[in-house]
Amino acid sequence: MKLALVSLLGLPLFVWPFLGQPLPPDVPAFTLAIGAAGGLLLLEVGARRLDARRLALLAVLAAIDTGLRLAVLQGIGGFSPIFFLVLCAGFVFGPSYGFLVGAFSIIVSALAEGGEGAWLPYQVFATGWVGVAAGLAAHLSGGPAGRMPGWRPLAILAAVGALSGWAFGALMDVQVWTTVYAGDPAVGWRPGMPTATALRNFGRFYLLTSLAYDTFRSVGNALMVLVLGVPVLAGLARVRSRLSFEVVSE
């Protein structure tokens, strides 16, 4: 429920242009993204789903992802290694934790590299949703529970990584499409544009400008999961079993 509410808060950032409305100003968008990530964190702590140990692990994962992002600022096409740990964390610890790892990895890495631009609120939600997708996929595959994952969970996570590579690119393109390409009659956006026309133009824009670029991200995500996923997933699953705690009502 908490995660659904946070996702609903972020959804208008991506939907408004398809309803003929411009993107919100930068300051409200920043406030919404930071508030949503921080609010979910506080709610998880308040519900006792996160203790100090899991918070420490969240900080470690965000720091590692920041290092990976700084080390590979310019990947091959749209590929970035930052998504690998987001996928693995969501798969092992669940959708809410996956969202937090994705959101805070983006926030911390943006602060570290000085990349706080108008795109950051969109990155926070889009990367968080990658972790959510991985967490939901774990429920379908019987994800790792303190053991080496089999081929089926690994294949499902690799597929999620591939699909999320394209989905992330499409979500991030909304901000570019409504600013850089505003007014272009063939592929651009304009205020008051009918929804059907907006969807058609955005589809053209994505196919022409982003599909090939995002394919590198999709393939890279899948390959990282297939090559490195087994030991990382098994390690995180062992950590999860050691960090598990039970709340006993008196």
Image: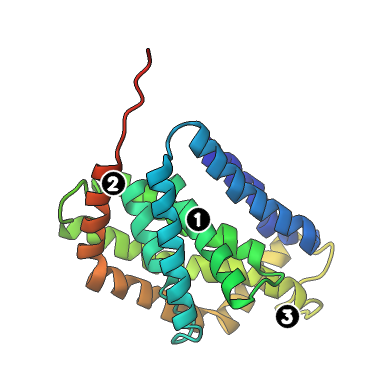
Task: Give the SS element for disc 1.
Answer: helix
Residue at the extreme top of the image, as rendered: 250
Circles 2 and 1 in contact, beta carbons < 8 Å: no
Circle 2 Cα neighbour tier, 10 Å, few/some/many (<14 / 14–19 / ≥20)? some
Residue 90 locus on image (x, y percent): 38, 53
Q: Which mark is residue 186?
A: 3
Residue 24 visible at all: no
| Image-based side of 188 in relation to 228, left or right | right
Q: Closest to the observer: 56 or 194?
A: 56
Task: Give the SS element for disc 3.
Answer: loop
Residue tagged by mark 1? 129
| Distance from the alpha carbon under mark 2 to that under mark 1 | 21 Å
Q: Residue at x 59, y 70 (%)?
A: 110
Residue 155 locus on image (x, y percent): 24, 62
Kind of residue indicated by mark 3: Ala
Residue 93 locus on image (x, y percent): 35, 47
Kind of residue indicated by mark 2: Arg
Looking at the figure, which quarter contains the C terminus? top left
* Comes first in the chain, label 2 or label 3: 3
Q: Residue at x 52, y 67 (%)?
A: 168
Query: Which mark is in front, 3 or 1?
Result: 1
Q: Which mark is residue 217?
A: none
Q: Which mark is residue 240?
A: 2
Q: Reply above or below: 7 against 212.
A: above
